[in-house]
Amino acid sequence: MLLPGHAAAQSFNMDLGHSGEPGATGRLVQITALFTVHVFVNIAMTIGLVPITGIPLPFISYGGTFVLSCCLLQGLVQSVYRFRKDFA
């Protein structure tokens, strides 16, 4: 349930890269990469493929600063969506 939800959210983030705003593509790629790396490293730690570090799962794991930064980053994604230029 977690992986399909994460995949859907990140594909939505990448679809916004064609919004027409200068710099939006780079910003969205970086945010998507950050969330994706955190998810895959956390899951790999859980099943024992990599040593345990301290990387939390975005929006799921408890950690005040990381949850706040995830919310701020998702707010940046939503601002790109809100102020996109639709060329129809």
Image (spheres, helix red, strand yellow):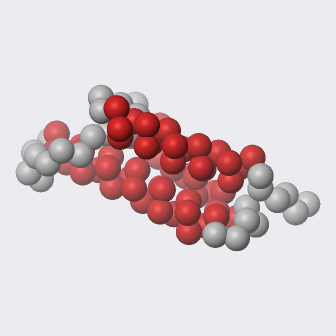
Identify the residue at horizontal 64%, vertical 64% (top origin). Answer: 24
At which x and y percent is residue 85? Answer: 82, 59
Q: Is residue 83 left or right of residue 38?
A: right
Which of 79 and 88 lies nearest the eye of the viewer? 79
**Residue located farthest toward the right when viewing the structure as drawn:** 88
Where in the figure is residue 33, as x and y percent of width and height? 42, 59
Residue 17 appears in the rendering: yes
- Check the picture and name the quadrant holding the N terminus: top left
- Return the x and y of residue 27 as percentages of the image width and height: 55, 63
Vertical comparison of 63 with 34: above or below: above
Total of numbered circles in the picture?
0
Q: Quadrant of residue 78?
A: top right
Q: Quadrant of residue 60?
A: top left
Instruction: Please determine whether, in this image, residue 33 is positioned above or below residue 22.
Output: above
In the rendered image, which quarter contains the C terminus?
bottom right
Can residue 8 be seen at all in this image of the molecule? Answer: no
Please give left or right for residue 46 compared with residue 64 in the image. left
Q: Residue placed at 73% from the left, 65% from the top?
A: 21
